[in-house]
């Protein structure tokens, strides 16, 4: 496909379960971002990769959150021992790397809606 | 952390009317972006602004990057039903890094 894809689109987890959310970026996009969007709010930054390197994880809310991108393409966001406050839409975005000072903007996937009961 | 104040929170307007929304920040940004999000979808980029004072149009949409680099506005002219959705402003302090989003403006259009 031409855009960023995410799976699953919807996930219901019982409190305490582990979940894994997948992101397939646009082919050739070097940069990949994860955002968390609570109901009625704007997206909030979680973490950022350039190729397989995780360059910024300052937005991860706790050590229960872990992200990886081992081959510099697909990324997985893992949440361990889910809590009710983890309920949100998790958005993935990708962009080309900066070339000659030009900024390439982020393209977002449709998100995964996580509900923790 | 950094926060963007976006207003109004929501608007309910008549089809054909013009719409204006804005975003302010206590921090300076090098880039201002405006996104639209439909239910069940991710944000879609509408307009990107890279220089203070820049005024950019995309069809019926016009956005400006404030001179102080701490604010931006988005105007939509002659609104139509498909303009319905949530509009977000976003700022970035460096090329390639994370975006900081406002809380969104919900736009509803009466036809």
Image (tube, coloured by chain):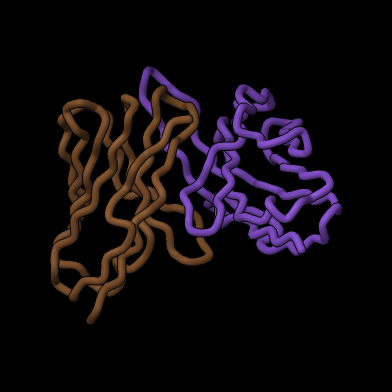
Residue shown at 66%/34% (left/top)? Answer: A60
Total residue callouts = 0
Q: Position of residue A101 (x, y in %)?
A: 37, 19
Q: Is residue A103 left or right of residue B59?
A: right
Question: Residue at 48% of width from left, 58% of height from top?
Answer: A40
Provide residue B39's location: percent of width, then percent of height: 48, 66
Q: Does the rendering let one see residue B59?
A: no
Q: Nearer the viewer, residue A83 or B43?
A: A83
Q: Position of residue A103 (x, y in %)?
A: 38, 28
Q: In this view, does A41 lie to the left or right of A69?
A: left
Please determine whether, in this image, residue A115 is positioned above or below residue A102: below
The shade of chain A is: purple
> Against A27, is A59 above or below?
above
On the image, the x and y values in percent for residue A38 come to 56, 53
Please indicate whether residue B60 sits to the left or right of residue B46 in the image.
left
Question: Residue at 77% of width from left, 45% of height from top?
Answer: A79
Q: Evaluate whether residue A56 shows in this view.
A: yes
Image-quadrant location for residue A69: top right
On-image quarter of the C terminus of chain B: bottom left
**Chain with brown colouring:** B
């Amino acid at each position: 496909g031409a855009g960023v894809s995410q799976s699953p689109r919807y996930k219901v987890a019982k409190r305490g379960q582990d979940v894994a959310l997948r992101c397939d970026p646009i082919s050739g996009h070097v940069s990949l971002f994860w955002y968390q969007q609570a109901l009625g709010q704007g997206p909030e930054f979680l973490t950022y990769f350039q190729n397989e390197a995780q360059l910024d994880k300052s937005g991860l809310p706790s050590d229960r959150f872990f992200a990886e991108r081992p081959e510099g393409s697909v990324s997985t966001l893992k949440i361990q021992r889910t809590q009710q406050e983890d309920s949100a839409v998790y958005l993935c975005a990708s962009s080309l790397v900066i070339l000659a000072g030009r900024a390439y903007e982020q393209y977002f996937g449709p998100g995964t809606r996580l509900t923790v009961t | 952390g950094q926060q963007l104040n976006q207003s109004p929170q929501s608007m309910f307007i008549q089809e054909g009317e013009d719409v204006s929304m804005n975003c302010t920040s206590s921090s300076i940004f090098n880039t201002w972006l405006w996104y639209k999000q439909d239910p069940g979808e991710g944000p879609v980029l509408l307009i990107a602004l890279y220089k203070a004072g820049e005024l950019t149009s995309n069809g019926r949409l016009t956005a400006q990057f404030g001179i102080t680099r701490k604010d931006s506005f988005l105007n939509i002219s002659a609104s139509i039903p498909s303009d319905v959705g949530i509009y977000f402003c976003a700022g970035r302090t460096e090329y390639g890094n994370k975006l900081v989003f406002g809380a969104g403006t919900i736009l509803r259009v009466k036809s």
